[in-house]
Image (cartoon, grey):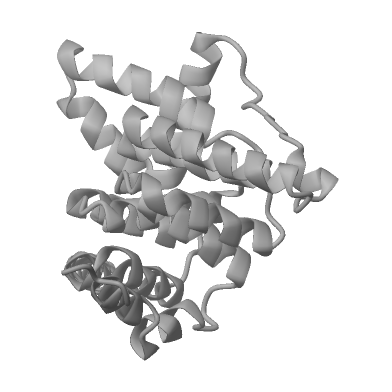
Amino acid sequence: MADDQGVFTRLYESLEDSAVIASVMRRPGIDDPTRAMLALSMVAARCEESEVPACTRRCVANGLGRSEVAEVLLQVYCYAGVYAGLSSFSAARATFDELARAGQLTPAQAAVCDASAPSRTIAERIADGARMRRTLFGDENVDRNEREADAFMNVFWSNTHDFCFGNIWSRPLFDRSLRSQLCLAIASAAGQVGAVDRHVRSALRGGVSRERIGEIFLLTAAIAGTGAARAAFDKAQQVFDELATAAVARLP
């Protein structure tokens, strides 16, 4: 029998509009433009191409444009892979084209600022990326990885220094704090628990508060489900506990 009243579809819509999810999206712990970018990064990381247009429109409604959305999706490309990045770029472009035809973009939102990293050669990017990695994760972490690396692993690290740290992390449009928050959003929504560990540590080093980390993971619950959010909360708590124990051990 035809579902003329759309009862089946409204099962999902009622959940999406529920008080719980709505309250997460209205929490004051994250400003609206940042929340819009974090939500976009989450659906993109999960390859939920059908959700990208709505998230792109939410970004535009909060004053963001092609430049900011492109920067978010570059971060997704770096941490969730080429397909997640490309499919999301394509969906976002179609949405921006539609908004432009409707006259719903300001000149600033319609423009694309592709401000690349300052280093130009591969050697410069690798050197700059190695320094950025130390800034993000600390000398102890990097020194340990370097001691354990061999020629095989160095293939990974040299390309990571070039592309990830020397290029994406060094682009000037977003600061370190915002990029760390995007990494937490991407890792938690995609179920990358090991990456949550690393990025919680890096975010704390960069001044992102525990409260902000918690707010990001609450958004994960709304976008990616409670299982993904709980795993991220549990991993973050392990990191907090470990860091607290280490701090006590260093006391005289």
Residue at the (49%, 33%) spot, across then down: 90
Relative depth, front residue between 143 and 214? 214
Residue at the (30%, 43%) spot, across then down: 140
Left or right of residue 117, residue 148 in this image: left
Q: Position of residue 126 (x, y in %)?
A: 46, 19
Relative depth, front residue between 182 and 13? 13
- Farthest-out residue, front: 1
Q: Decide: is 199 above or below 142.
A: below
Residue 4's quadrant in the figure?
bottom left
Left or right of residue 61, residue 28 in this image: left
Q: Position of residue 163 (x, y in %)?
A: 44, 23
Q: Position of residue 171 (x, y in %)?
A: 60, 34
Q: Is residue 173 visible?
A: no
Q: Decide: is 229 above or below 22.
A: above
Residue at the (20%, 67%) spot, across then down: 242
Quarter of the image containing the N terminus? Answer: bottom left
Quarter of the image containing the C terminus? Answer: bottom left
